[in-house]
Image: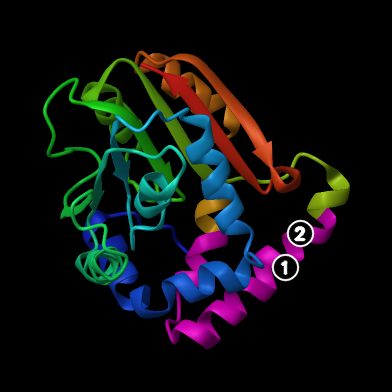
Amino acid sequence: MALDKRPARVAAMFDAIAARYDLLNHLLSAGIDRHWRTVAIRSLRLTGRERVVDVCAGTGDVALAAVSAAPGAARVVGVDFSAEMLRLGGAKVRARGEGGRVLLVHGDATRLPLPDASMDAATAAFGIRNVERPELALAEMRRVLKPGGRLAILEFSIPASPLVRAVYLPYFRHVLPRVGRLVSGHGSAYTYLPVSVGSFIAPEAMLDHLRACGFRQASARPLSWGIVTLYTAEA
């Protein structure tokens, strides 16, 4: 399929699958997605005082993980351009009694509605590859971070090991889209997923983008045999 990352198109796609998004995340990853978020939040080395921005916040799982960690963030602002994902995320936040610490707002990853140097940490989980110009989103995350602020980005990746690729890629390219279509009822969203991952920049190129935006100590850590990469850096 042709990869169309125009913001309106991608937002509409996520609006359409929002109701089954959390279920499919847990189902298709066999629950490992919770571990990935835990590792990302742990990498921020939170002390309980930080203000965190979560970019491409979706239904708020990363934001909730950040405030429920021990110690957790003092406050999280989640930004996403899918109104339906935010609506469902807001319901989760209220159900968990975290409305005082988690704020989910409608916005663009390339134009974050936050002042310069106003946040202590920034996160993004499985959303940067959906941004039409990811380098602009990275630059925005750098802009809103205070000096020394920490960054953690989770993104799908293609495993480096030929053996892991031989096992994983048939599932990722063929089984996952079929299950996704069946459960979500959406014809193209879970076909878009493997195409978007396959066309996303390699880890070294991602690190180059982070450095070009002014981040220091940028690193890429493979998780789960390389099907996911955790990128960390400091402002």
Please tell me in which quadrant of the rendered image residue 166 appears. bottom right
Q: Is residue 173 magenta?
A: yes
- Looking at the rendered structure, the secondary structure element under dot 2 is helix
- Looking at the rendered structure, the secondary structure element under dot 1 is helix
User: Image point 29% across, 71% down: which residue?
Assistant: 95
Q: Evaluate if marks 1 and 2 touch, with contact meaning CB atoms under 8 Å apart.
A: yes
User: Image point 41% across, 50% down: which residue?
Assistant: 68
How far is the residue under mark 1 from the one under mark 2? 5 Å
- In the picture of the structure, the residue carrying the numbered disc 1 is 171
Q: Amino acid at mark 2?
A: Tyr
User: What x and y, as percent, mark residue 13?
Assistant: 33, 70
Q: Is residue 210 left or right of residue 219?
A: left
Mark 1 neighbour class, 10 Å CA radius: few under 14, some 14 to 19, many 20 or more: some
The stretch of residues the image draws in magenta is 166-194
- In the picture of the structure, the residue carrying the numbered disc 2 is 168
Quarter of the figure that contains the C terminus: top left
Mark 2 neighbour class, 10 Å CA radius: few under 14, some 14 to 19, many 20 or more: some
